[in-house]
């Protein structure tokens, strides 16, 4: 009796009070304008392409735990447990030009930048980087690095 592995993402309640989405205003403010009545080409779908309500924190923790392991094995396991493969490459850079010491995900969450080395192993771009290395950009939020709150204070 084998347990099926847990997905590497979780659903977030987007209808809760205080949840604000980045995209513009309501559709009701844009419909039936004179310009739209003249041209149907400018009229778009009400169903956007942005996916909301998914939190990929479990994926990021999974990738950080797999540092030093074979990339092909890590990638195949991650893809099997995800809804789509794109969030993997928010942290993992396959090209040298895309490498960054840290990656900002969301408003105040930072994670170590990862890359695949010449031996096909998953590595951190800057292994010396930690929660004491970065400074918060504001005093109102709790900034985290790999899930650990920053140790430096807002200046």
Image (cartoon, helix red, strand yellow):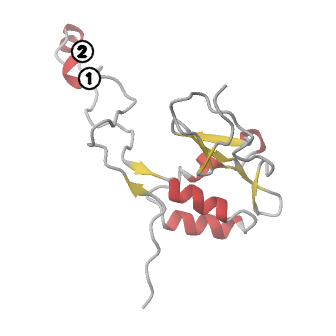
Return the x and y of residue 80 as percentages of the image width and height.
50, 67
Residue that extends furthest to the bottom in the rendered view of this protein: 1
- Residue picked out by circle 1: 43
x 72%, y 62%: residue = 67
x 19%, y 22%: residue = 28
Figure quadrant of residue 42: top left
For the residue labelled by badge 1, is the local secondary structure a helix, a strand or a loop? loop
Figure quadrant of residue 155: top right
For the residue labelled by badge 2, is the local secondary structure a helix, a strand or a loop? loop
Return the x and y of residue 86 as percentages of the image width and height.
53, 50
x 61%, y 28%: residue = 137
Residue that extends furthest to the right in the rendered view of this protein: 118
Q: Nearer the viewer, residue 140 or 7?
A: 140
Determine whether, in the image, residue 58 is placed left or right of residue 4: right
- Residue picked out by circle 2: 39
Q: Are marks 1 and 2 in contact (CB under 8 Å)?
A: yes
């Amino acid at each position: 009796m084998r347990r099926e592995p847990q997905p590497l993402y979780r659903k977030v309640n987007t209808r809760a009070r205080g949840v604000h989405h980045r995209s513009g205003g309501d559709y009701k403010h844009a419909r039936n304008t004179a310009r739209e009545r003249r041209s149907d080409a400018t009229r778009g779908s009400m169903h956007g392409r942005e996916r909301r309500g998914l939190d990929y924190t479990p994926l990021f923790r999974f990738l950080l735990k797999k540092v030093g392991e074979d990339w092909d094995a890590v990638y195949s396991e991650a893809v099997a447990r995800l809804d789509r493969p794109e969030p993997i490459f928010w942290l993992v850079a396959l090209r040298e030009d895309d490498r960054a010491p840290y990656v900002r995900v969301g408003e105040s969450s930072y994670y170590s930048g990862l890359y695949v080395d010449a031996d096909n192993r998953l590595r951190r771009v800057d292994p010396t980087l930690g929660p004491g290395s970065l400074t918060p950009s504001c005093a109102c939020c709790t900034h985290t690095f790999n899930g650990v709150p920053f140790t430096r204070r807002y200046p």
